[in-house]
Amino acid sequence: MDIKQLRYFIAIAEEKKISAAAKKLHMAQPPLSQQLKNLEQSLGVELVIRHPKGLELTEAGANLYKHAQKIVKYMEESRLEVKEIGEGVRGKLSMGVNTLSSDILATELRKYSERYPLITYKIQQNESAQLCKMVRERLIELAIVRFPLELDDFSILPLKKEPFYFVSSAQDDRHSSAIQFEEMQAYPLILPSTEGLGVYHMILEEFSRRNLEVNLLSECSDIPMLLELVSSGFGATIVPEVVLKMHKGHELKATRMDDTHLSAASGIIWLKDHYLSMAARHFIEQIK
């Protein structure tokens, strides 16, 4: 018994005549009669009672008709769903975003969901190195990460660069509208990352390039907690602009750092030479 035979049987059950069912199916009558006989033989039961004026379903035939309707409907829905997934209009977009986050994500996802309302989402936040690992292990397809990173295994779509800001408590009166790196040495710093990773390393490198010591108080990868600590006067920090855009409501004094090589570069990554769902491809095209 296959899906074609079930379609034939549904037509026969509904039309009550082989001739009418054959006409509905756009086929000749003898082959349809043979298909019905083959189906009865394969199941070992009589499905219809043949009368001079037409056909009547047996109890077994009525039961098969009920199930055949469900099966054919399910098969059609499955075919459409698989087709839609292949075309990227249905399915799941799985992606990660760096702990320091990205201010484009919310806006782009809203636009994307308007174009593809049947897509669902899996969004995970983590450090960039962890996100790379998750993409390699196929736990997510895409990730928005902060550079620098070793990305030989990945395709990369760069996003815009952004400046860094020196941030202290709103009550801080030790500098005005500008601050030099030499002045930052007086501040205990809370760095927004974990030792050895992207932003943490970049900040230390910038101090080292100027032959300056860093008054390192703490590291903190939880950005809301970091900003709360800075707001309280516990220490100061250096963060990319996006952090200030996305985490408002803290009493802070933020000074843009123009006299520096520091700039926050980020991008979307995915594995080279691996399958990428149409949902992910459509998102990449939208960002481009």
Image: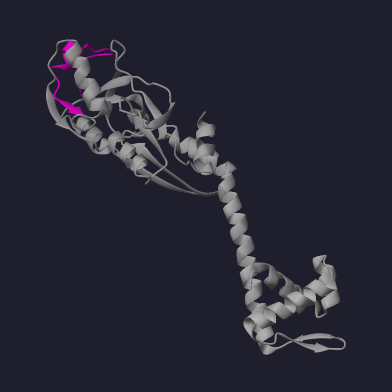
The residue lying at 83 percent from left, 65 percent from top is 26
Left/right of residue 76 with respect to residue 188 in the rendered view: right
Q: Is residue 27 above or below residue 157?
A: below
Residue 94, image x, y percentages: 43, 45
The quarter holding residue 156 reads top left
Number of numbered discs on residues: 0
Relative to 94, is 252 above or below?
Answer: above
Q: In this rendering, does residue 283 appear at all?
A: yes
The quarter of the picture where the N terminus appears is bottom right
Residue located 73% across and 80% down the image:
37
Q: Determine the main secondary structure of the stretch shown in magenta.
A: loop
Residue nearest the observer in this picture, 34 or 98: 34
Residue 142 coordinates in the image, percent (x, y)? 42, 38
Picture quadrant of residue 153:
top left
Side of 247 relative to 55 (left or right): left
Res. 89 in view: no
| Chain part drawn in magenta | 172-191
200 lies above or below 21 = above
Relative horizontal placement of residue 154, taking residue 276 as reference (left or right): left
Task: Based on the picture, tell me whether residue 6 belongs to the magenta stretch.
Answer: no
Residue 196, given in percent of the width and then of the height, sits at 20, 29
